[in-house]
Every structure is written in structure tokens, then in C-alpha cells.
Image (tube, rainbow, N blue to C red):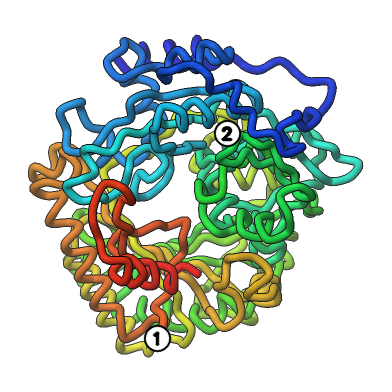
Amino acid sequence: MRNTTILLLALLLTLLSSSSTWPPPLTACAAGQHCDDRAAAGSLPSCLLATGVRNFSLAGSPAYDALLNFSIQNLRFALPAAGAVPRPAAVVLPRGRSELTSAVLCARHASLRIRVRSGGHSYEGLSYTVGDGGDDADRVRFVVIDLMRMNRVRVDAASATAWVESGATLGEIYYAVASSSSSLAFPAGSCSTVGAGGHISGGGFGLLSRKFKLAADNVLDAILVDADGRVLDRSSMGENVFWAIRGGGGGSWGVVYAWKLRLVQVPNTLTAFTPKRTGSVDAIAGLVHRWQYVGSALPDEFYLSVFLTIGGASSSSPSRDGNVTVSFTGLVLGSKELAMSVLSERFPELGLAEPEMSEMSWVESAARFAGLSSTEELTSRASRTKHYAKSKSDYVRSPIARGAVAAILRYLAGGPAGYVILDPYGGAMAREGSGDTPFPHRAGNLYSVQYGVTWEAGDNGGGGGGGGGGEARMAWLRALYAYMAPHVSKNPRAAYVNYVDLDLGTNALAGNVSSPSSSVSRTRSTWGSAYF
């Protein structure tokens, strides 16, 4: 069945032909016309067909399930038609800017809410569901505009820039950039199947961010299709909107059709390493405690994160001798000699040995940290990591005491299968102004924390979107989040919008439920303060 689905999608998702002009000239809509003539037809399918959009699938049609589920990364939301998660009336796959504009206007004309999906990695499925709207969510009619056919990447190595359509994955960007020049790179996340649209819209942290800041910090221009079908570049959308789309979260101001990205210069040789260390809880607590003083203070060229796989049958569960294991992920923009020289002085407790390190090109490191066996696999959209999952996030501004770290490790060891990732900040991240983009988590943050639990359909009844074992795992994760409260940022307790977490609050679906405006404002204030 899986091979059949992939074959079907391969036929549907043919590559676009090259354009001699990139980006294409703005249409007349940019001059202030609303292009309402595109949406003259009555129903969604007739409107789409009348405006030249033929790549769509309606609920109940043969290709619908394959198209909807292909980019759903969190299986909590990949349910049968009878499941509890509302499903879109249609999935539309525009092939370019004109079809994207038509899809937006046709959906509005049909009174359908719009969800925009570029990679499907939204932790709460917000790019292809209506989110947590309570009982009323079942009555919300919406359409998914899936951008995966809009995945062109045009690199200009001479100017160190690239125009990237929002449906391109990070892997496709990395492969195209490296194919144009071995000394150019783009700073963004490590998961190769993440879509550019959502990732950049939320900020876009990655292994190069301590040196080159976020993906959103390296956006030079963008082309936005707004709710009236106007096609706007940086000049015509205005600096306020251009500011907002670079970190304010996707899907709020329109659909970003494409981004103009600043590429960065990297050495031809980088050093990557992923050492594991096993020891008693107290010994590993000492290592993690020490890392808190090191990770954000290393030279900008260094990235060194902590990865704890927790509970269940994971390597962080206490073994019979009471030992636990911690993993580190390291990337250095330079040679082994540079890595050894700095880390042996700054973090001798790690005991890093030269045989644990590998020198490689930047694109090879991107493939390695994405869990791929070759750089060619960066262009594949087929995800290997689909599972049921729930995640949460935090920021730490002061080192956690060693005794508290040990207590946290003991707490983690008793939990279900999951992970905790500690990502170092500092460097160029800290020198960027907290208001230069909507991403405010800059100076003062030592590191971010990402917590997650995962399960499979048969794990103690954990399938079906969180029932049984899934509900138990999510409850444990929320208890862990509460347990961490004394050790993380306060007033507000901050979170990363790209690790979206509906536990922080949701808005009533306007026009479908009745909520006092004061209640809605309080809800927005809660998650707004955390994210922004």
C-alpha cells in the first residue's frame, strides 16, 4: 500500500518546468486590483476549474486520502474519515503563483477557511486541521492548500542569494545550494522534509544559527498572496508586514509564495560528531550541568547540543548498574584540529577524542544530521519519522543546579519513550535585536528545551490520536512540563512558535462559537506572551 501511494504521488507531483524569469513578474493584482473575477464561479470545484486549477481532490474522491496523509508527519492527525479530527473539504495543490492566487480566492468565495501546508510538520497539525476548536471544530468547513508542487529553488551563486518557493523542503534547498557552490549554505533546521514556508515563517533555528542567526533573519524579500488575491513583494506589502512574516508564524497575513534568501559562506571542511557518554545519574548530571556554561559561550562557529532519549526501553533508562546515557550533537565550522583545540580547553569533561569526529562538507553534514545515508536523499519528501507525538518547549536563562539536573534525570528515566533536546543559543543569535524580527528569544537565553513523547498505534492502545497509551504519554509530558517550571524562564514562561503547543491556549473559532471578547483576549495574551 505504501509503495502504491508513493507511486500515485510521484505521478501527481511532476516537476515544474524551469522559468526563464525568476521570480516571475508581479501580476496586475499587485497594483491594487482584487482579482475578484477569478472567483466568479459558485462552488469550490467549479471555481478552481474555471480559473485553471485542476490539481485538487475533494473529500471522498479516490486520491483524497493519499494526498491528505502524505505530508502529515504526526499520526495523531492522520485518521480515517470517521475519526475525531475534522478533515478538509478539499486538498488543493497549486502549481505556481497564479494557481495559488486562484486557490485563495476560490476558497474565500466558497466561505471555506484556509489552511496552508508546505511540509506538514506542524506539531499540532495546524497546517491541515482546524486545530483545537472544541466541539464546534467539527462544523468548521476548510480547505488545505498544499504547496508541495511549488518547490522550485533558484540559486544565484554570484550574489549568494536564492529564490525559494514555500513548498520546497529544507533538504531540497540544501541540495540546490550545495550543487551551485561548495562554499555556500543556508542556516535552517536539521529535518530535511520540513517545508520552507512554515519553518521560515516561525523563525527557523538550526545548527548554523549560532554563527548566522535564524532562517528568518536571512530573508531579503518575499512574495505574499494576501486574502484579496493581491501579489505583494517587500516594497508593496510594506515593512511592517515584511517584519511580521519573518518569525510571526505561518498563515496569519496571507500565503508566502516565495522567499528571497541570503546565503552564507562556510568552509569547505566542517567537523561533525555525535558522542555518547554513559555513567551514573550523578556523573551524567555533572556533564549536563557543565554543558550549560559551555554551550552558549563557545565561539560562534561551534554548535553543541544535548540529546536525552528518555524512559521506556531507551538508552537513558537506568541500566542494571544504574547508569544512564546522554548524547551530544556537535558541528564545527572548521577542522578537527580546531574542534579539539577549543573543546579540550572549554569542555574537557566531555573527553572528546579525535576518532569520534568526522570531517565533511556542509551538505554532507546536513544529510548526516537528517539521518540520511547520502546527500541525494535530501531531495526526498518521504518521511522516515512518522509517529504519534506530542511536544512542548521552554527556554532556560540561568544554569540549573547540578542536584536539580540529577533529579530531573531520575524523573525522566521513569517516563514513557520520548526525548529532551537542549539547543545552545548565544553567538550571533544573542547579538540580534529582540525586536528585529518577531522572534524575541535572543540575548539572555542559554538554551532552548524541547520535550517530546512518541508512540505507535499498538502501544497500549495508543493509536487513534492519543487514546489509551497516547493519552497517558501526553499526560506524563504535561506533568514533566509542570515539574520543570522552577528551572525555566518566567514572566513569561517562553516557548518557540515553531514548536507550537495548543496547551498554551487556543482562540475561539470566530463566527462559530460565542466567547466573551475579554476571554478571547486573555487566551491570546497567554500564548502571545509565551511565543512573542
In this rendering, the label closer to the viewer, 2 or 1? 2
Camera sees residue 263: no
Q: CA distance from mark 2 to mark 1?
A: 40 Å
Q: What residue appears at the point 45 percent right and 86 percent down from the top-left corner?
A: 399
Residue type highlighted by circle 2: Gly
Q: Is residue 386 above or below residue 413?
A: above
Based on the displayed image, in which of its 4 quarters is residue 278 positioned? Answer: bottom left
Percent position of residue 161, x then y: 81, 44
* For residue 139, side relative to residue 268 (left or right): left
Percent position of residue 345, x then y: 64, 81
Q: What residue appears at the point 61 percent right and 54 percent down from the top-left corner?
A: 245
Percent position of residue 430, x then y: 65, 76
Q: Which mark is residue 2?
A: none
Camera sees residue 268: yes
Q: Mark 2 = which residue?
A: 167
Q: Mark 1 = which residue?
A: 400
Q: Identify the mark nearer the N-term, 2 or 1.
A: 2
